[in-house]
Amino acid sequence: MARWIEPVTLQGKHVLIEPMSVAHRDEIAAAAADGELWKLWYTSVPSAQAVEGWIATALGQRDDAGAMPFVIRRAEDRRVIGATRYFNTSAENRRLEIGHTFYSLSVQRTALNTEAKLLLLTHAFESLKCIGVELRTHFMNHASRRAIERLGAKLDGVLRSHQVMPDGSLRDTCVYSILAPEWPAVRNNLAFRLSRA
């Protein structure tokens, strides 16, 4: 059966987004170590000890559920500075979620993040012909919520006590989306922000 989301490499001026593999293990661990991101209790960024299992889960979603996990490289030096994933895919409804995203602390709130989202959303709406793209985050992850809202995504709602976190706490999940008719304005906003970066 043909896949809806085929492996693809997305290239911009600032970032290169490529399909994830087990060979990226050490690079992903190093990217997460920049800021010790696994210590943020409201995220699921892997520590060096957990990165193999994290990659195995991502690749399992790719093989069994039509997802596509990526690593994000800084174009100037090819260093992996984060990871992201298309998942919760529905080819028949032409919808997907962008998530499991993290960026090294040293590149957060930079043009790299903006361009990565522009590349991922452009591919989703213009190549995959998505009707809607979702982005979700923990209610308490205020930085992530602000970043998603800066994209132009709209809050669809909050799923209360939606997930049990590794520490046993309950996650309220904020669900955002961008719809195909909104994409041109979102694209223009991201391109404008990039031009001023």
Image (tube, rainbow, N blue to C red):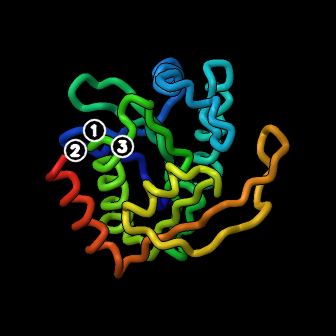
User: Residue 159 at what x, y percent from top left?
Assistant: 71, 67
Q: Which of the two discs, 1 and 3, sits closer to the camera? A: 3
Q: Is residue 89 visible?
A: yes
Q: From the viewer's perspective, is 157 left or right of 103?
A: right
Q: Which residue is labeled 2 in the image?
A: 12
Q: Which of the two discs, 3 and 2, sits closer to the camera? A: 3
Amino acid at dot 3: Arg
Q: Which label is found at residue 81?
A: none
Q: Which residue is labeled 1 in the image?
A: 15
Amino acid at dot 1: Val
Q: Secondary structure at mark 1?
A: strand
Q: Is residue 36 above or below residue 146?
A: above
Instruction: Tell me which residue sits at (41%, 46%) in the image.
Output: 7
Q: Secondary structure at mark 2?
A: loop
Q: Which label is found at residue 109?
A: 3
Q: Is residue 183 above or below residue 164?
A: below
Q: State how far apart marks 1 and 3 are (Cα).
A: 14 Å
Instruction: Tell me which residue sits at (44%, 63%) in the image.
Output: 149
Q: Residue furthest left?
A: 195
> Residue 162's image quarter?
bottom right
Instruction: Tell me which residue sits at (59%, 55%) in the image.
Output: 137
> Residue 151's image quarter?
bottom left
193 or 102: nearer the viewer: 193
